[in-house]
Amino acid sequence: MPKGFVYVTDYVPDITLELRYFCSDNFIGTHIDGYEAEKCILSLQAAKALQKVQSELKKQNLGIKVFDAYRPQRAVDHFRRWARDINDTLMKQEYYPDVAKKDLFRLQYIATQSRHSSGSTVDLTIINLKTKKELDMGSSYDFFGKISWVSYQNLSKKQLQNRKLLQEVMLKNGFRNYPKEWWHFTLRGEPYRNQYFDFPVR
């Protein structure tokens, strides 16, 4: 692991991990290249910012669950190969029922590079620390559709409140959002902007 990167659990030991690309519970339906262990890696600066987020949420008996953090370039390459295979629609009903697979690049759901590979971007949600259940955000993680957009309003009052809480606590502690994914945040002033790493997650 390059200097400047850390295991997030060394800084936030009580964080919950559900790294979807280490297993098959994801939009491709298989383990993703580059994920050799269920380890959450980020830049030191991003890990310290998440530490503040977790501390703030714990006051409300809530906490962070991470779905993805640092993502090797080889994983992004895996996504690209999959997206070009129009016949592989194994997970379509669950993750992209209303989007044609051939349009995933055009609609920017799949790209040739990812901010995740720079090491300061994280996909996450909020859980109840007592029940370990995720707060209802109105759509599942990695769902390709407008319902996942931060600005989407056709949700229940509680779902909107939960999304607002997530956005507020992340933005307050140094992150910026990605408008098309309520779960996706990048550290402002990230240390390795425009650098795309490929070391494996292990």
Image (cartoon, grey):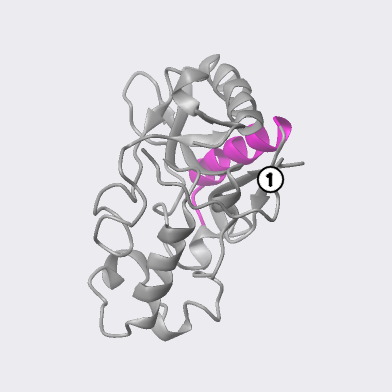
* Residue closest to the eye, 155 or 122: 122
For residue 45, side relative to residue 201 (left or right): right
Q: Position of residue 98 (x, y in %)?
A: 39, 77
> Is 162 part of what is drawn in magenta?
yes
Question: Image quarter for residue 179?
Answer: bottom right
Residue 145, placed above or below residue 69: below
Callout 1 amino acid: Tyr
- Which residue occupies 37% across, 70% down? 96
The secondary structure making up most of the magenta span is: helix
Determine whether the residue tagged by mark 1 lies in a helix, strand or loop: loop
- Which residue occupies 42% across, 18% down? 14
Residue 149, placed above or below residue 83: above
Q: Residues within 10 Å of mark 1 (few under 14, many from 20)?
A: some
Q: Which residue is mark 1?
A: 192
* Residue closest to the eye, 55 or 75: 75
Q: Position of residue 43 (x, y in %)?
A: 60, 35
For residue 92, side relative to residue 68 (left or right): left
Residue projecting furthest to the front: 2
Q: Quadrant of the C terminus?
A: top left
Q: Position of residue 55 (x, y in %)?
A: 57, 17
For residue 167, side relative to residue 89 (left or right): right
- Which residue occupies 61% across, 45% down? 185
What are the residue bounds of the magenta stretch?
A: 155-173
